Amino acid sequence: MGCGREWKALALRTRAEDSEGVLIPLLRRWDEEARSETIDRISPAEIDKLAHHALSAPGVVLGRALARHWPEAVFGGFGSTLKASWSGLRSYLDQPWFVKALGGGEKHYPESLQKAIIEGNLESVLDEQLWVTSRLQGTAGETLASELEEVLRLRSSVFFIHSTDGKDRFTLRCHAALPFTEGRAVSQLPGDAEEKPLRPDELRKAFNSPFWPHVLATTSIGQEGLDFHCWCKTLAHWDLASDPVSHEQRQGRIQRFGGIAVRKAIADLLGGEVLSPSEMTTSPWVRLADVAENTLADESGLRPWWILKGAETQNIVFSVPTSEQEAKFRWLQEQVLLYRLALGHPNQEDLLELLKRDHQISGDQVRAASLELSAYFGASTSGA
């Protein structure tokens, strides 16, 4: 009975968004079917279909993943979970490019989608995103469902392209790659001719998810104070920063606590230990975090969530013939390493690699020089 009430409440709340008018007739049909038939037995074939549905239906998968991080997601918070599924995940998956990519056309899209959900392990993706939202952003309870709905509801956006003389203008619709600036989201409401404003904060939240946009283009406005590390480990420099501090600020956007590069390295090291079939009611990421903190942490407080061997981010520099970009990038790398060294940064591997590559100084030479310096400073201190 509670589920039925929540479905009807959802239909009333989303009536304006239900442009095709599918939800209310669907609920009526469910009520009619429930009243007209009495189920006294279930055949093995029906059990198999029910199990397949439980494994592959998008809403069921979302509810199961959400319940691992919010125990009241199904019993107690069903309304919020239902809204995240219908208004969020359904909205995200109801796009023509998914139909095209999965094949089979619109007629067979439900079957193609369920197959993709199993083969692509959507449940694992949702589970990791919910753990990231709860652990890295301090979100809990019903807010987990609303945050998930918000990022899934992000629609394609319209941006205006102007000719150089300013006389002509045309629109460009984007979703895979978006500029980190004020935009206009395409309205999905019937009779609503105006696009909705798309704020940078909405873009930042959506980019910090595994959904879309997949590429974010920004000027120096995104260089400081913003986090883009949750699902991004590649930074492409259209042009380079003018100094090492600014370059370090840029790099810091994707090198932060619990970034995807760090999580991947932790999963590679410890994933096999936590995927126990006997404890599937608990999120693997909750168990993985406990094991990582117990086995990989050190006195610096930076391992394992800030730095870890194998947690590499990627820099891409656009370089054309006769360009100074590559030489400038090497110079910036060297300056950044010296900057880190002056601040006592614990990541010496990059510095050793630079000394070996550009200055032909081996690790043994660095070690010998360090011992000589230690002896010198020790003697100076005792002499004083």
Image: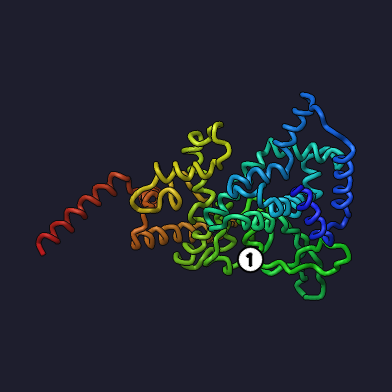
Q: Is 56 placed above or below 234 here?
A: above
Q: Quadrant of residue 208?
A: bottom right
Q: Quadrant of the C terminus?
A: bottom left
Residue 290, x across and y down, in percent: 45, 44
Q: How many marks?
A: 1
Q: Nearer the viewer, residue 380 or 309?
A: 309
Up-down relation of residue 233 to residue 188 (above or below): above
User: In the rendering, at what x and y percent does residue 289 appear?
Assistant: 48, 45
Q: Which residue occupies 53% across, 58% down?
A: 138
Residue at horizontal 49%, vertical 61%?
328
Q: Is residue 13 or residue 340 the one in the foreground?
A: 13
> Is residue 370 toward the left or the right of residue 42 in the image?
left
Front residue (pair 243, 271): 271
Reading the image, the residue beneath label 1 is 201
Query: What residue sits 72% from the left and 58% below the top?
Result: 154
| Residue 316 seen in the figure | no
Q: Amino acid at mark 1?
A: Asp
User: Residue at left 55%, top 41%?
Assistant: 282
Q: Is residue 343 left or right of residue 69?
A: left
How packed mark 1 is, by other alpha carbons closer than 10 Å (few <14, some 14-19, many 20 or more), is: few
> Residue 29, position in %: x, y?
89, 45
